[in-house]
Amino acid sequence: MNTTLNIQAQVILLITTVLFAPILAHAESAEDESAKNRGMAIAVEADKRDTGFVDFTANMVMELRNKQGDKSTRTIRLKTLEVIGDGDKSMSIFDKPADVKGTAFLTHSHALKPDEQWLYLPALKRVKRINSKNKSGPFMGSEFAYEDLASQEIEKYTYKFVRDEKLNGIDYYVIERYPAYQHSGYTRQVVWVNNKRYVAEKIEFYDRKNSLLKTLNNTDYQQYLDQYWRPDTMLMENHQTGKSTLLTWENYQFKTGLTDKNFTRNSLKRAR
């Protein structure tokens, strides 16, 4: 009798699985599609709120910290030009210390095609193009990769909404984004988006093995022109090496009159 009941139970389970598997698969597919759409909608809203700043300049101190706690600092000037319909253009100029003074880094970000990046090395008096397949390498000894420094256009990722979460009294949308670029150093990024300001306040980066590599915390946000939010501090911590990089920003100036001419390869050599 027990054997008969066992066989009947197995038959019922098999029939149930066959009958309801398509329904369950459809429900999971619909749920996944909804999560993707919501993740994309959050990314689009964040991009919309940061559109129209035209250009800006700022000063920044980069503090490199090793596992033992030793620190070294670099002083940098930055300028960015907004490009509607494509990625932004930006330039970073190193002023201190003496061994990197005059070094300049230029990025032409793009929405769909690979970003273009060049590094001017004053000691060699030459401009070096950064290989588009090597964007996961560290920028000037920091924990920021070259690909972290390009503008984060919507088209560079696919998205998925994960959950709502409250941290320290602040409500966040937690989304995942997956790089569309095949040579990215990351499989995915988990982003905590402030659901009032629509800015990323925390990002976890997962390496090609899908292991947690780094965490970026953006804090002390200030608002400019009654619309645009920028963090005063950005801390990137590498969990695999124990190293970290702290960026401290100040003196933001918007709509300064920058043009494409300020972001050419030749302008790298003239950067002072």
Image (spheres, grey):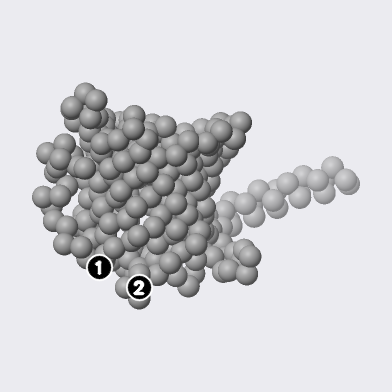
- Label 1 with label 2: CB-CB less than 8 Å: yes
**Which residue is painted at 20% across and 63% down in the image?**
256
**Which residue is painted at 52% across and 52% down in the image?**
217
Judging from the image, what secondary structure is the residue with disc 1 in? loop
Q: Where residue 154 sits in the image (x, y, percent)? A: 32, 56
Judging from the image, what secondary structure is the residue with disc 2 in? loop
Circle 2 packing at 10 Å, graded few (<14), some (14-19), many (20+), is few
Q: Which residue is mark 1?
A: 52
Residue at the outermost right position: 1
**Which residue is painted at 34% across and 32% down in the image?**
98
Quadrant for residue 86, please give it.
bottom left
Instruction: First in sequence, mark 1 or 2: give its number.
Output: 1
Q: Which residue is mark 2?
A: 227
Q: Where residue 56 sits in the image (x, y, percent)? A: 26, 59
Q: Where residue 155 sits in the image (x, y, percent)? A: 30, 53
Quadrant for residue 122, please give it.
top left
Q: Compared with residue 45, is residue 250 higher up or lower down, i.e. above or below?
A: above
Residue type at mark 1 is Gly
